[in-house]
């Protein structure tokens, strides 16, 4: 296993970093906080123009056919910049679900549009007061003629107002995993969107479904296969969330180190104090060490091969667990080094601290990730 990046991958990193610095600067990130759309259409178009939306979509469906290693490079840079966009839910999760379980018609119809950015798909998974597991999916999909009627409430649906398609997890039976995936038009009769607000000030919605009619052709995959498909694709997606976290942690450490060099107390820089320097050294160790499980998981996914006997189902949750803890801990330490001013809106460290905590508890939180790692490590059923 070679974790050195190629010249082309290094060029990809430079390109994405340059794009974020001009089209998604931290000033623009601030302007988009709590925005009902949540991202810049100009930035989204530039991602499309540079083939970054279709980066990991096969060429047969209008994408670039790159691997998870290129994806990790892109996400590390998106995390470094805190760049807001529906890339993860549309180009990673929704595209991944279609590639794994969609019909050929569904793939041909939607994947090229996702790669171009003209279609935005988002995932509707979590529900009020319910957990991350299959039993947490209680939105009902009731058979009705040749289709289904969907009823229930979804929470924390990213970028729903800008989406052209919702991928809804809904229950079709009483068994724990009797769950299907449905493509739903967010403008369909019976769909109500209500903006939600979070510590990250990102773009999330409550989606209320009131007997929303969908045809049988809107189902992704065979009956009852939805949870297995979702779980597998989410595991793969965790690789990119981990890369995003490490990218954010690395930049948070950079600005904290610079502040410790510039800010003087008692006629010497803060970094000259042993306690502060040790905090920074510990953070640097964690950030540099955290890249290894991220890159290992990305390499395993890209090559379809395990690393030391562990495949993506173990490596991906392990990577997100460690990377998100590192992101949160690094930004919390940064807040302490900055002192009281670190919590003011003028300073960037508070942006990273809030995003770090939100990412840590999103998609799968620490206890859920630990459970996944434990199940794989102990080789016992979930």
Image: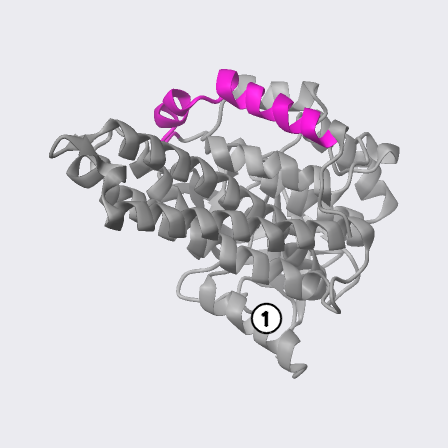
Q: How is the image coloured?
A: one colour
Is the C terminus in the top left, top right, bottom left or bottom right quadrant?
bottom right
Q: Main SS of the magenta segment?
A: helix
What span is colored magenta in the figure?
9-35
Farthest residue toward the left? 266
Q: Where residue 250 appears, x then y in whole percent? A: 47, 39
Q: Where residue 152 appears, x then y in whole percent? A: 49, 58
Name above or below for residue 302 compared with residue 36: below
SS type, badge 1: helix
Say which of 203 and 370 sits in front.
370
**Quick check: can you spot residue 354?**
yes
**Quick check: can you spot residue 200?**
no
Name above or below for residue 165 compared with residue 170: above
Q: Where residue 1 appears, x then y in whole percent? A: 78, 53
In the rendered image, residue 73 lying in the magenta stretch gets the answer no
Report the residue at 51% width, 39% height from top.
Answer: 247
Q: Is residue 82 left or right of residue 196?
A: right
Report the residue at 81% width, 41% height from top.
Answer: 107
In the rendered image, residue 34 lying in the magenta stretch gets the answer yes
Q: Is residue 377 left or right of residue 202?
A: right
Q: Which residue is mark 1?
A: 373
Report the residue at 69% width, 18% height from top.
Answer: 49
Q: Mark 1 Cα within 10 Å, few/some/many (few <14, many 20+)?
A: some
Q: Quadrant of residue 130?
A: bottom left
Report the residue at 65% width, 72% height from top.
Answer: 177
Name above or below for residue 209 compared with residue 349: below
């Amino acid at each position: 296993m070679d974790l050195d990046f190629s010249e082309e991958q290094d060029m990809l990193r430079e390109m994405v970093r340059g794009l974020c610095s001009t089209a998604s600067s931290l000033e623009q990130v601030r302007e988009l906080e709590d925005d009902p759309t949540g991202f810049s259409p100009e930035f989204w178009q530039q991602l499309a123009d540079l083939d970054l939306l279709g980066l990991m979509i096969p060429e047969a469906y209008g994408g670039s056919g790159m691997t998870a290693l290129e994806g990790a490079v892109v996400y590390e840079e998106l995390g470094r910049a805190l760049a807001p966009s529906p890339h993860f839910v549309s180009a990673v999760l929704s595209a991944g679900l279609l590639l794994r379980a969609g019909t050929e018609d569904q793939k041909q119809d939607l994947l090229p549009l996702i790669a171009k950015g003209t279609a935005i798909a988002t995932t509707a998974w979590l529900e009020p007061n319910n957990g991350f597991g299959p039993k947490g999916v209680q939105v009902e999909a009731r058979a009705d003629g040749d289709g289904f009627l969907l009823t229930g409430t979804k929470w924390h649906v990213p970028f729903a107002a800008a989406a052209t398609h919702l991928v809804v997890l809904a229950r079709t039976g009483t068994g724990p995993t009797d769950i299907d995936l449905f493509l739903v038009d967010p403008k369909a009769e019976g769909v109500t969107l209500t903006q939600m607000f979070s510590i990250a000030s990102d773009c999330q919605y409550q989606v209320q479904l009131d007997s929303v009619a969908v045809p049988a052709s809107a189902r992704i995959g065979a009956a009852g296969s939805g949870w297995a498909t979702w779980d597998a694709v989410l595991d793969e997606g965790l690789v990119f969330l981990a890369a995003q976290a490490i990218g954010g942690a690395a930049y948070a450490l950079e600005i904290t180190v610079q502040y410790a060099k510039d800010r003087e107390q008692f006629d010497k820089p803060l970094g000259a104090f042993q306690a502060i320097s040790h905090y920074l050294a510990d953070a640097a160790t964690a950030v540099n060490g955290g890249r290894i499980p991220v890159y290992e998981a990305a390499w395993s996914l890209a090559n379809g091969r395990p690393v030391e006997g562990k495949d993506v189902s173990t490596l991906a949750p392990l990577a997100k667990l460690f990377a998100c803890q590192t992101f949160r801990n690094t930004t919390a330490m940064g807040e302490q080094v900055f002192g009281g001013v670190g919590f003011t809106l003028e300073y960037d460290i508070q942006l990273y601290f809030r995003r770090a905590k939100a990412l840590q508890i999103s998609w799968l939180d620490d206890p859920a990730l630990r459970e996944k790692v434990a199940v794989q490590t102990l080789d016992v059923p979930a």
